[in-house]
Image (tube, coloured by chain):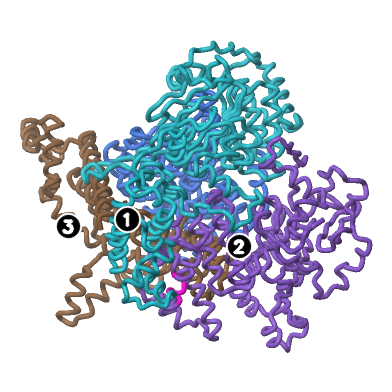
Amino acid sequence: MTESIISVRDLTTRFFTDAGQVNAVSGVSFDLYGGEVLAVVGESGSGKSVTGRSLMDLIEPPGAIVDGELWFHSPELAADLTDHPDAVDGDFVDVRAVSPAVRRSLCGTEFGMIFQDPGAAFNPSLTVGEQIAEAVECNARLARGETYGLSNLLRDVLSPASSFVSPESFERAVDLLERVDIPDPAARADEYPHQFSGGMLQRAMIAQALAADPTVLIADEPTTGLDVTIQAGIIELLDELRIDTGASILLITHNLGVVADIADRTAVMYAGEFVEVGPTDRVFDHPANPYTEGLLGSLPTFDDPNAPITPIPGNVPNLLAHEMPPGCSFAPRCPAATDECTATDPELEPVATDSSHRVACIHADIAADAGSSSLADSTLRPIDTPAPERGDVAYE
Amino acid sequence: MSNEPAPVPQDSPGRTAPDRGPSAPLLRVDGLQKHYVDDQGLADWLLSNDPGRVRAVDDVSFDLYRGETLGIVGESGCGKSTLARTILGLHEPTAGRVEFTGTDVHEQVATDRKRFARRAQIVFQDPSSCLDPRMTLREIVREPLDIHQVGAKSHRNETVADLVERVGLSTDHLERYASEFSGGQRQRIGIARALALDPELIVLDEPTSALDVSVQAQILTLLADLQAEFDLTYLFISHDLSVVRYLCDRVVVMYLGRVAELGPVDRVFEDPSHPYTRILLESTPGRGARAGDRKAATTDIPSPRNPPSGCRFHTRCPVVVPPETYGAAFERDAWPGILEYSRQVRAGRFDADALATLADRHGVDPEDEVALERAIRDRCSIPQPLTDEIAEDLLGASLAALVSGDTETALAMLEADFASPCAATAPPFVEVGSEHRAACLRACEQDGER
Amino acid sequence: MKDELVFLGRRLAQGVVVVWGVVTTVFLFRVISPTNPAQLMAPDDATPELIQQIEQDLGLTEPVLNQYVYYLSGVLQGDLGFSYMTNTPVLRRIMFALPGTLELAAAALVFAVLASIPLGILSAMYRGSRIDSTSNLVSLGGVSTPNFWLAIMMVLLVSVQLGVLPTSGRPIGLVDALTLLVFQADPNGLTSWVAHMILPTIALGTYFMALLFRLTRNGVLEELGKEYVLAARGKGLPESLLMYRYVLRNSLTPVVTVTGLQLGGLIGGSVVVESVFAWPGLGTLFIRSLNVSDWPMMQGILILVGAGYVLTNITVDFVNAKLNPQVELA
Amino acid sequence: MISDRTRTSLEREIRSNTVATIGVALLLSMLLMAVFAPVLAPHDPTDQDSSRNHQPPLFFGGEESETTRMIDGEIRTVTESNAGTLAHPLGTDSNGRDVLSRTIYGARTSIIVAFSAMAVSLVVGTTVGMVSGYYAGRTDSVLMRFVDIVLAFPALLITLAMIGILGNITVTVPDPLVASGLVSDRPTHAVIPVTITLAISSVVWVWIARVARGEAIAAKNEEYVMAARTMGMSNLGIIRKHVLPNSITPILVLATIQVASIIIIESSLSFLGFSGTTLSWGYDIAAGRDYLATSWWLSTVPGLFIVVTVVGINLLGDLLRDALDPGIQRGGL
């Protein structure tokens, strides 16, 4: 539970558009621990989805990951890759430094992705069962070391039924559908995506992500656009899967309520950077960054209807490089901003009271020995102290 | 800007809330229905196909009083947006009436839409679609003034500038096109446009659901300020219970075109009488309940095209009323298990494959029907045997049919022998507290006991 | 099965309405046209009485509504009337000219499909490459060149300058050519058929080739940007299978639709191409009838082509609905 | 009518797309040619002279041949070269008329027919489409069935049938450039082929109507139209102020692209001999067919002009579509 599975260092993803360079993700570093749910929250355009897609290596032109390391805990792969000393550090492998083929095999098997809009992430002209079975099959073939050659393709083109998916894979797909609580899975496997409701399709999406027994699930806004009752079911399912399979979940969302319900730790993102990371209760009860505070203050509190809401003034900046404010990007909207804020861009530093809670704000109450955890000398020593065991730690 | 005469108080037949004194409601919705009927071609007529019918709004009644904010909450397909548009006369109702200060809205709209337009306006949900992209901020906010020829032309630009400043936008941006504003700013423009004619009622159709949290907060505080300043009445449509709780005085909870519960926000949300309201509250994220603690109704919401019989919520309801025929202990001991059993049969969870898996898991021979029946009862937590003998016999027959592979008969038997009154009768709308009403047979029982 | 019947029933009912409209329009054409058929049919020195007699024989003195009812009931029984000029049944003449046009249109369609789709896929896959820019240029030329001029230019180059291919006529039909081949083992018929087909086919098919190329290229490009293609990559699907099962199959739906619907356009285009190559088909027949105001013949051709178009439309919709699970049949 | 953003994206598109710029330039030169035909044409396009027939274009020909001619009352045998001359840079036809001048005048016919047919179609098609899409219901069904009927005929067949009905109507108008005395020795009147224009309009309006209807339906469901209704705006007002302005861009893009089809239909009709004027590209191509073996340029030159014009229009259409219609962007950002 306290073992780090992924260590991301200085991830930087940019888009090179006609309007200019967009700094979608600017030097993000974090660890994801075994079996935890780490939530990345932020408003639209904060770069949280791009972070998730960068981990999956799904950035398409005109975008590109321009910098960063993505260390993945895989002793087997590390042992295999003896000829790439740069890409290996102990049991960790830098996914960004390995060959594209190895990277692809990791992204399909060890990392599963749940997309925001399941309606767009399923091919409309293949049945849901078939598509999940494809994921199963890809994984099985990879395990057996089989490749898919031209002769296979010819057979697929010429025969009316696909020869790619074996009956066993299809059966496994039905099992997966049952696993995510889809009623009558055998019949639903033969239906097309448009015959599914949004909630059911999201469950099918999760089933597809589970096809390869992933170690890490990246869930990109898995409940957006769903009704609350359906959304609650999906969150419940994710929590259940985390316990059953031991997979870590990187939950990308804008819904603070969902975060409070399920996440062990929370990372708050603003303008392409992490501005605060820490245990969820800690971040929600004692926010150290004025932006986090503002975000929480913007939410109507259900159980105290008379509590006033205090909106953050202004708008989320767009991420065009030449339009970004200098220094701390939240400074123009920040009630506590001083001249200093526009001069320096703050780094994540542990707060004084709790080293598992880190914040990027020069006005926050930062631990005295902050300098020692700068990224320069951290190789794979987790930069975040491990997540507390669920419910074991009480905060003062 | 205000030149609307004060509405004449009307007699209201017995439905006025006691603490509002003799004042008549500003808006009264009475038995409103809006059904969409599919187009029927020649071929359908020849093949005598029944045209499809979407019961978007099906018998909705409530009153809206001057100065209050009434929330309408519900999930997608519950008909809340159709309701709003029908109230404003944008759709012709299939049945029922909407009265605005005592006069029928649809008669008024048919004869003089403009007069009604000055009394009721709407703010829309989608910031990308609510403004004409080819118009500037000035043109958009001026448009209602131009249509109604309010004041002198030169005066209108001043009114526009006032409105724009009042909603928190800069008059420097008057000549900008709608597409150049952010989502939150567009929503402010939409509000300024709605205010231009100085209406009494503003319908807010999910005005913040497409906005980020920090912007939503800006719009919510703006709406609250404007209400106090211009003495507005709001009909606030939303799916977000926290927002409704923050902004509204009373709330209508809708499910599949019908009103499930209605009452003051505090009472409805703190002591809900309808199981659907309870589930909505439990599902609302961030209320401290950890995932896994709730019993959310995770099954799909049925389609308003083919709504369930009786109480529309009974297919997802955790507290369906048991049939009356069996003994008193039946509900406590046997009913939850039987309910679970019938839901699983209906969902196809006991087909041949599933039975084989079940047998395997329980370590019994799949050919051994008695053992298999026991496994099913185990899985659905049905006690063995039921205290009521008749019930036991009937359940046994259904189980026997199921393990012999005849799922259809098993289901038919269940539906005949263990039919809940919830599936048969639509519950009446009963008083469960002061000004607090709900449509649930359970609530009726309490009502009867009182 | 019921869904399919309902779908077909509904579309056929609509189709019947459209065909009835076609027949009515075509009837009105004749009524409002200024030419007097009796004048055309009568000898030059005919007396007014004779002309009146002919008018009476043709039923032209009847009220228009009666004429309409006669015409409509005739059409319903497969009787399209008699040609003013030759006094032969219109239907027989049309049936005689139909194979020429059908063979030409079908050959042009096959040529267009075979040449455009592979090129469109390649272009989209290697966007910005030399293949792509060349194909784009060719397709721009293809949609911008009138088919009759292309035909003349080909005649000029291939036949006048090189002297290789025949430039006019249709000495033998496909059925006869095949009969000859099968029963008399004589391949000359087929060679002649092919030789005479080549130039007209290219002339007629080039525009559609260019059109289909653009559609295929755009379709594949659009499909490549879809999120489910990204998702399929994420799950590790082999790239070749992904191209086939996700990109190509989905992008072909509009191509199939347009191919079906362009049959009408091919028939229209064949009017001019037939005229260049002295091809005995519907187009030549139509122009000849137009020049002598032979309305029954023109009406017959228009009704046949219109009805054929409506039927093709229904077939294409049906096939698409069967192929594409998102389209509901009912 | 065009917003700043649209203008910026148009400008960007023009700057970044040199091919399209070439297209626009081609089209503009064709337009100029049509307008200033009397000034630009070196000869009267109808001026016949059998002594200089079948002259090849400049830089072509050059074979010498002996012919007998009557010169100064005597019959002499002279050696003549048929090399192209600067006086007739694109050669002469079988009647000795200047091919360049005829082609320049031919542009007029094509462009007059294309623009007037498109103008008629735009007015009729947009009106029908707007009414049909906005009011929906029975009006829509009736109008759309009618559209289906027109679409059931191939465009060329129905235009031919219309020509059969209308006969060959033409209107002759005085050429303003000649009338003003700017140039002389040019045809004093221009012929406008009314029948062809009407016949082509009778199909093209349908294409416009279909797109206009789709746009009207889309615009009608936008929330700003609902807002206008709650403000009490009349249906006609809504169509005029909101639906039409927001539908006009795709309609104009389609109209641009369809002008290319009209030019091809017009040239096909003239080629078949139904133009109503002899000064047209299609007519000259047809006339040149008989001399393919000897005078290749007769059919080739007018055809090239058609292709250049249509390419220009198609490039402009692609440019407008890319710049104005975000729905059909060419991938990428």
> Which lettered chain is shown in purple?
A
Q: Amino acid at mark 2?
A: Asp
Residue found 87% across the figure and 71% down from its top: A376
SS class of the residue under badge 3? helix
Instruction: Indicate yes or no whether the magenta region holds residue A172.
Output: yes
Mark 1 Cα-neighbour bin, 10 Å: few <14, some 14–19, many ≥20: some
Residue D180, percent across and down? 55, 29
Mark 2 to mark 1: distance in Å?
A: 38 Å
Q: Are marks 3 and 1 on the same chain?
A: no
Q: Colour of chain B?
A: cyan
Q: Amino acid at mark 1?
A: Ala
Q: Which residues are magenta?
A: A169-174
Q: Which mark lies nearer to you, 3 or 1?
A: 1
Mark 3 to mark 2: distance in Å?
A: 72 Å
Relative horizontal placement of residue D155, taking residue A29 as reference (left or right)? left
Classify the position of the N terminus of chain A by image quarter: bottom right
Letter of the chain that mark 1 sits on in the rendering: B
Relative horizontal placement of residue C198, taking residue A258 as reference (left or right)? left
Q: Which mark lies nearer to you, 3 or 2?
A: 2
Residue D207, percent across and down? 41, 43
What residue is disc 1 on?
A: B391
What residue is disc 3 on?
A: C95
Q: Colour of chain D?
A: blue
Mark 3 Cα-neighbour bin, 10 Å: few <14, some 14–19, many ≥20: few
Q: Colour of chain C?
A: brown
